[in-house]
């Protein structure tokens, strides 16, 4: 039997679509759209390498929509008022005494990110064993660095959603028969962060040796980041984000200085996920028509009422509904409207976040004046006054500046998958609002049921 690339990614992507054993019974058929792995893992042509590179950029987008909806709900940024799936306003908000059900639908991101991670591993192997003259040594290094960056990105999001459950960080040797279905054990949150950081550092070294251009086509969302040298700046931005979760403030500043961080630059600079209505592509999964009643994503009320007067981020990100939507005791008066068109891009990471990470590092290392300068860049960009005018009492107060930092992250990074993680890492989950007395805020999701089953049947 030959596994197609599609089938093997699904099987070995750490998470499985169905819990039953029948899922593993793959028919011995030939899929012309998903060639056997043997045809790309050895002697891949330059055309095949290019196709794989473009494919990974496409799958890189997968998982993001589910993640921000789930993390945004637990982090009390938004609510998905889906009348056809009430668990969004019951189970996810903590109304069930037993917590998450074993087969909860809220781990969809996990499968998507695991499959993308696996694709990145295959891409790296295909490049290393490509046909003679298909790639230069520098291009192979560029692909290794690209693949490691993609893997680290997916792992960090999987880890932050799973938190103390940890994630798997290792695969066994992909060259050995049968080993593609032998994932390594789960490791702790701290150990996983260390491995993610290592992958990013290794990727940065590889990208530095990657020559002047990638050996595959980079899509338009990476304009300004489409060469190994510039993609390395994206890699360093992700390393800074990882260092933030490690509370490694010195490392955060070091990696920021190697990224595209610019204290005086445009807040919007950074790579994006792009979407289109072109056949074969997908549209922005976070786009929604306003004032719908079936499944609107609405802002939690305090996002509007607790905003500073004149904060332009509010009007850019939410729109008042013509009539409120009520479901299970939650009343939504404002639709999330960050993406007016189904073809709008979604930011992966941008200078605005990097400036806020810099501000956090300055606060944590006692350089409060520098922190205020950075926070002012974001405040002014949002139409607010500088802190010396708006909040002079907090200028030399570390704890008050942490409050200000978290508030600026709340509004700048709204519905981007950060608020829940931010409040958790500062021990403030209890400060998040509950709209009903029986609501509670979780600190992590349940481990995917298929992972539990896998380890039960395959003890390590």
Image (spheres, rainbow, N blue to C red):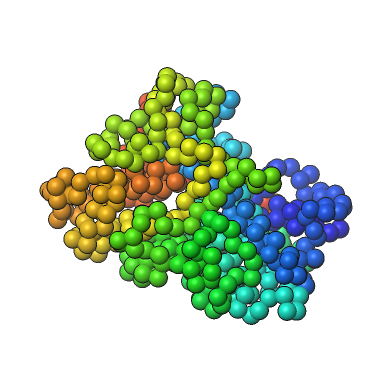
Quadrant location, the N terminus: bottom right
Question: Which percent across, then down, holds residue 313?
Answer: 34, 41
Residue 452 visible in the picture: no
Question: Which percent across, then down, holds residue 167?
Answer: 55, 56
Given residues 421 and 254, the one toward you in this image is 254
Question: Which percent across, then down, holds residue 58?
Answer: 62, 53
Given residues 228 and 20, the one toward you in this image is 228
At 56% from the left and 77% from the top, the residue drawn is 211
At 50% from the left and 66% from the top, the residue drawn is 231
At 86% from the left and 54% from the top, the residue drawn is 30
Residue 287 visible in the picture: yes
User: Where on the picture, by quarter, is residue 172?
Assistant: bottom right
Quadrant location, the C terminus: bottom right
**Relative to residue 449, is residue 200 drawn left or right?**
left
At 34% from the left and 63% from the top, the residue drawn is 262
**Relative to residue 304, is residue 41 drawn left or right?**
right
**Relative to residue 88, is residue 128 drawn left or right?**
right
Q: Residue furthest left?
A: 393
Given residues 449 and 149, the one toward you in this image is 149
């Amino acid at each position: 039997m030959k596994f197609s690339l599609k089938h093997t990614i699904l099987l070995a992507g750490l998470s499985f679509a169905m819990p039953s054993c029948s899922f593993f019974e793959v028919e011995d058929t030939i899929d012309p759209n998903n060639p056997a792995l043997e045809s790309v893992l050895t002697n891949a042509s330059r055309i095949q390498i290019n196709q794989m590179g473009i494919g990974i950029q496409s799958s890189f987008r997968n998982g993001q929509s589910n993640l921000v909806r789930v993390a945004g709900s637990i982090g009390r940024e938004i609510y998905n008022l889906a009348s056809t799936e009430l668990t969004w306003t019951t189970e996810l908000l903590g109304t069930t005494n037993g917590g998450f059900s074993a087969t909860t639908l809220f781990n969809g991101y996990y499968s998507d990110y695991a499959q993308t991670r696996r694709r990145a591993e295959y891409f790296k192997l295909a490049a290393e064993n490509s046909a003679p003259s298909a790639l230069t040594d520098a291009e192979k290094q560029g692909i290794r660095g690209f693949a490691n960056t993609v893997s680290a990105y997916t792992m960090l999001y999987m880890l932050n959603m799973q938190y103390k459950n940890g994630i798997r960080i290792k695969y066994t040797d992909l060259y050995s028969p049968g080993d593609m279905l032998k994932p390594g054990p789960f490791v702790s949150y701290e150990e996983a962060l260390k491995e993610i950081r290592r992958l990013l550092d290794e990727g940065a070294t590889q990208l530095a040796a990657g020559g002047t251009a990638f050996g595959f086509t980079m899509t338009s969302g990476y304009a300004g980041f489409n060469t190994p040298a510039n993609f390395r700046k994206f890699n360093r931005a992700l390393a800074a984000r990882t260092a933030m979760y490690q509370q490694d403030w010195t490392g955060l500043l070091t990696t920021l200085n190697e990224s595209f961080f610019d204290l005086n630059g445009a807040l919007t600079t950074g790579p994006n996920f792009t979407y289109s209505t072109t056949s074969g592509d997908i549209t922005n999964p976070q786009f929604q028509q306003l004032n719908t009643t079936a499944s609107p994503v609405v802002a939690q009320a305090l996002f509007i009422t607790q905003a500073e007067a004149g904060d332009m981020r509010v009007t850019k990100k939410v729109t008042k509904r013509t009539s409120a939507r009520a479901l299970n005791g939650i009343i939504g008066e404002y639709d999330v409207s960050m993406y007016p068109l189904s073809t709008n891009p979604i930011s992966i990471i941008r200078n605005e976040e990097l400036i806020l990470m810099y501000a956090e590092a300055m606060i944590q290392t006692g350089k409060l004046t520098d922190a205020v300068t950075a926070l002012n860049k974001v405040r002014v960009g949002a139409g607010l006054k500088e802190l010396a005018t708006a909040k002079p009492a907090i200028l030399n107060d570390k704890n008050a500046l942490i409050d200000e930092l978290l508030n600026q992250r709340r509004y700048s990074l709204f519905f981007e998958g950060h608020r829940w993680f931010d409040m958790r890492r500062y021990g403030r989950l209890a400060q998040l609002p509950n709209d009903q007395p029986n609501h509670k805020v979780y600190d992590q999701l349940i481990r995917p049921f298929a992972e539990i089953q896998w380890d039960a049947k395959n003890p390590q």
